Image (cartoon, helix red, strand yellow):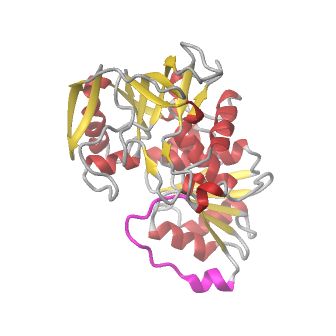
Amino acid sequence: MIQSVMVKPAIIEFHEVEIPTPGDDQVLIQVKRIGVCGSDIHVYHGLHPYTSYPIVQGHEVSGLVASFGKNVKGFKSGDVVTFAPQVTCGKCYPCTHGNYHICDSLKVMGFQTNGAGQEYFAVDASMTFKLPPQVSIDEAAMIEPLSVAVHAVGRAGDVRGKKVVVFGAGTIGSLTAQVARAMGAAAVMVTDVNDYKIQKARECGIDFAVNTLTVPFDQALSRCFGPDKADLMLECVGSEICITQGIANARKGTTIVVVGVFGKKPAVDLGLVQDRELNLVGSLMYQNKDYEKAIELAAAGKLALDKMITKRVAFKDYLEAYHYIEASQGNYLKVMVEL
């Protein structure tokens, strides 16, 4: 089979390797789709702090069951599946207390261990999820980032009837906003500084999409939600500007979920956090229950996943995905590699 290997930043080579043999508790997946995410782009530029080379990328993946080990139940050849790309130790305090997604030794396929950028990939059945027929092979490859959004919204508890602000209309921000609406939020406002992403947010059914270069955030917040402001905020950018806007404009007692990855340590006003009893809550990755909820939402047709696919490239043109992203000047959401 063919395997794509990023041998160093911005250089992908294709190697001929043996098809993996699934272990007794594994599923062998014939890979069909690979989504490219922001962390992949950091690897492409050599800026990911926890990835070394060579590395096989690919963690947003869907495919078909090709075969499976003797202990595996519940799958058959041809099933459409995806998987959670976490590698955990099972022994540390988080793992033994139900929080394996923040394992002390957490590794992620495609970053600290090889991912599924190849024609066939073997993965533990316990981390593999079968998709119902209502979910397309494209949508199946978006379950991983969708699960990030499900977990993030879940960190805030029940959002039914709440007014929600999401900072960032990129893939994770758009998915987070859509999940909040699908889970019963009264209204959702998403912000960004890119008109393309603002327009895509509107196409995906978000109630309010605001370019904060045009309308200041505080004015937009009052205009959309009135004097009582928002009940919940989710920062999906990793931007000091955005987290500062959230803390400065949050109603007293508000929860702010931090979803975005901060490359540079932000300076934030913890005095306001203390004085206004704000709740800053971190959110990392997902658990299996988040995958199950993400699949449920996708199958119910409550999300506009198809509208988020901006570009498709063939597997042999994997590098073109990154070239397209570089040339797009931010005017993209999800680039999909097809096998």
Q: Quadrant of residue 258?
A: bottom right
Q: For this view, does 336 lie left or right of residue 46?
A: right
- Residue 210 visible? The answer is no
Residue 267 locus on image (x, y percent)? 45, 78
Location of the N terminus by quadrant is: top left
Per the rendered image, the range of residues in magenta is 258-275
* Up/down of 137 relative to 103, above or below: above
* Up/down of 60 relative to 98, above or below: above
99 or 211, nearer to the observer: 99
Whether 267 is among the magenta residues is: yes
246 or 117, nearer to the observer: 117
- Residue 23 visible? The answer is yes
Residue 94 locus on image (x, y percent)? 60, 59
Q: Residue at x 27, y 31 (%)?
A: 4
* Up/down of 155 relative to 85, above or below: below
Q: Residue at x 41, y 27 (%)?
A: 121
Q: Residue at x 38, y 43 (%)?
A: 331
Q: Residue at x 26, y 24 (%)?
A: 17
Q: Quadrant of residue 311?
A: top left
